[in-house]
């Protein structure tokens, strides 16, 4: 029998925790080995230029190109094994052929980290829009009720020791596994995880068994990443692949998710309890139902009904979509045995989600909200809701990088014209430390526009993660700039100090 080939520690992100050795044969039963019976490794990489003696190279299709074309380079750098989807020349280096090298790379990354998700109950939240809000509210509902709850989302990493911005890319399986390990090590028993289509496309959750999966909606979006609407829906449906056999699917009962619900119900149980499902929405057929009784730009009140019990819930957000997200979060709470009244109290206490329809209130008459839309669908939902509640002018102020991320070059004004009376895109230089004449002119336009608005009007500031502001960016976020304008315009003490300094 041929020997097991052992790979060393790559020294990069895909490396083992505490010197753990992982067997490829053990986690990929359908693997075929050429030149050995197994590859046991303590470190992997999918970047040929990072390979060193003893590493295991995973050849896969990435944004950088097809890794199979880089096998020769990896071999020349001394790798002890190659994992690929097809037979490729390796100059005698042992080769493992797998059905899907991207899935294998992700699964190895979690295994090398010690499979931290196995120490947690994972609640995964996906969908075209509403993921961050639903994740935040679900974590708030579970907090102090089911154990110690952590959260990983666009908002950041929330754990027992507080919250911090998310500095790593959770679409990278090694980064996700490391973040889960930190939460497990800090004492978390549950984690609410926001899952993007990019994560699903890259199998970032390979080998993770989610106790609960939440699907907010599936609409036409992110075609620049996935090509077609059909491909996007197929990738979103992968969320069921990581749902534990006895897990629970929570879905928007008003959306077109019947096929997903049927597929979840038809999954084989393998001796475990059957997959359960809960629907939340505004229709009478939903397990958790909402009925809005009062709504305005200052907030809304709705009645939450489940199991014959009804409780009122008051939220600061005016959007119907926010209520939908709150109902999905309530379903998560019910999944873990919480009482409706306790859920209502938690939703009311935590309904302000950082950067998601967050109100800027400095004493002005005009309502000003800050949002970080992740897609055109999410932005359309927000603007549509505000348009119905705004008798006057609806104004959109957007950072240029955010506008590009949401609508593409030159497309934001056209996309929002059906809802907005004014749309102003701020150039990047306006929020940089070194302003030029174009930036000053843009600020002057914002100053004139903001000064002309009244109580019947409404302003949405589009800024946040969608803009792709890197950690080394030295500028001021557009939302902070608008907040500064409001403070200067409506705080008499600041205005007097400014005039005195001038």
Image (tube, helix red, strand yellow):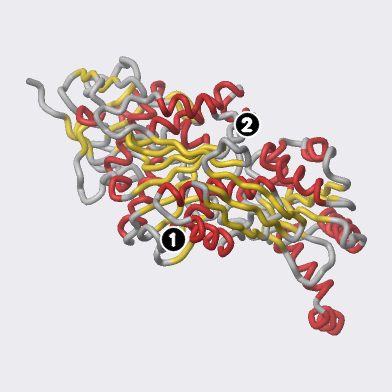
Q: Residues within 10 Å of mark 1 (few under 14, many from 20)?
A: some
Whether residue 355 sits left or right of residue 342 in the image: it is right
- What residue lies at 64% left-to-right and 60% top-to-bottom? 314
Quadrant containing the C terminus is bottom right
Please state which of residues 26 and 429 is positioned toward the viewer in this rendering.
26
Q: Residue at x 74, y 54 (%)?
A: 295
User: How far is mark 1 from mark 2, CA to CA?
Assistant: 30 Å
Q: In the rendering, which numbered label is found on residue 368?
A: none
Quarter-of-image position of residue 108 = top left
Pinpoint residue 391: horizontal percent, then vertical percent. 88, 52
Q: Nearer the viewer, residue 143 or 85?
A: 143
**Residue at mark 2:** 219
Residue 239: x %, y % from top left: 45, 33
Using residue 312 as the reference point, say whether residue 210 is left or right of it.
Answer: left
**Residue 435 image position (x, y, % from top left):** 77, 60
Q: Residue furthest left?
A: 1
Q: Secondary structure at mark 1?
A: loop
The residue tagged 1 is 143
Is any atom of residue 28 visible in this view?
A: yes
Q: Secondary structure at mark 2?
A: loop
């Amino acid at each position: 029998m041929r020997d097991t080939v052992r790979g060393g520690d790559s020294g990069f992100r895909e490396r083992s925790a505490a010197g753990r050795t992982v067997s490829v044969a053990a986690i990929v039963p359908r693997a075929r080995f050429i030149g050995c019976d197994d590859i046991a490794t303590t470190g992997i990489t999918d970047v040929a230029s990072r390979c060193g003696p003893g590493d295991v190279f995973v050849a896969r299709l990435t944004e950088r190109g097809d890794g199979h074309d880089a096998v020769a380079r990896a071999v020349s750098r001394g790798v002890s094994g190659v994992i690929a989807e097809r037979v490729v020349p390796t100059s005698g280096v042992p080769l493992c052929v797998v059905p899907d090298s991207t899935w294998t790379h992700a699964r190895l990354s979690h295994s090398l980290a010690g499979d931290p998700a196995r120490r947690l109950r994972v609640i995964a939240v996906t969908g075209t829009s509403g993921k961050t809000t639903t994740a935040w509210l679900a974590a708030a509902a579970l907090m102090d009720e089911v154990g110690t709850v952590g959260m990983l989302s666009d908002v950041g990493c929330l754990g027992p020791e507080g919250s911090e911005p998310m500095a790593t890319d959770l679409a990278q399986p090694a980064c996700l596994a490391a973040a889960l390990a930190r939460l497990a090590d800090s004492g978390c028993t549950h984690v609410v995880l926001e899952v993007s289509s990019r994560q699903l496309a890259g199998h970032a959750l390979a080998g993770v068994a989610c106790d609960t999966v939440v699907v907010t909606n599936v609409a036409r979006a992110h075609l620049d990443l996935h090509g077609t609407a059909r491909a996007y829906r197929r990738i979103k449906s992968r969320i069921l692949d990581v749902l534990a056999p006895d897990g629970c699917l929570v879905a928007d009962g008003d959306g077109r998710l019947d096929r997903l619900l049927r597929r979840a119900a038809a999954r084989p149980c393998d001796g475990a309890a059957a997959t359960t499902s809960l629907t939340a929405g505004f229709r009478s057929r939903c397990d958790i139902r909402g009925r809005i009784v009062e709504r305005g730009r200052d907030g809304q009140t709705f009645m939450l009904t489940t199991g014959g019990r009804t409780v009122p819930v008051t939220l600061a957000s005016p959007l119907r979509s926010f209520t939908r997200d709150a109902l999905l979060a309530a379903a998560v709470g019910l999944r873990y045995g919480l009482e409706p009244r306790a859920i209502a109290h938690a939703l009311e206490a935590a309904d302000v989600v950082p950067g998601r329809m967050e109100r800027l209130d400095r004493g002005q008459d005009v309502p000003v909200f800050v949002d970080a839309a992740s897609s055109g669908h999410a932005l359309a939902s927000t603007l549509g809701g505000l348009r119905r509640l705004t008798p006057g002018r609806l104004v959109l102020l957007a950072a240029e990088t955010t506008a590009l991320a949401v609508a593409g070059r030159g497309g934001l004004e056209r996309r929002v014209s059906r809802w907005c009376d004014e749309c102003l895109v701020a150039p990047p230089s306006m929020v940089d430390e070194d302003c030029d004449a174009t930036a000053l002119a843009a600020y002057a336009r914002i100053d004139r526009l903001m000064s002309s608005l009244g109580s019947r009007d409404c302003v949405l500031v589009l800024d946040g993660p969608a803009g792709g502001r890197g950690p080394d960016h030295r500028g001021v976020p557009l939302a902070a700039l608008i907040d500064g304008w409001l403070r200067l315009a409506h705080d008499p003490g600041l205005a007097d100090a400014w005039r005195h300094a001038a």
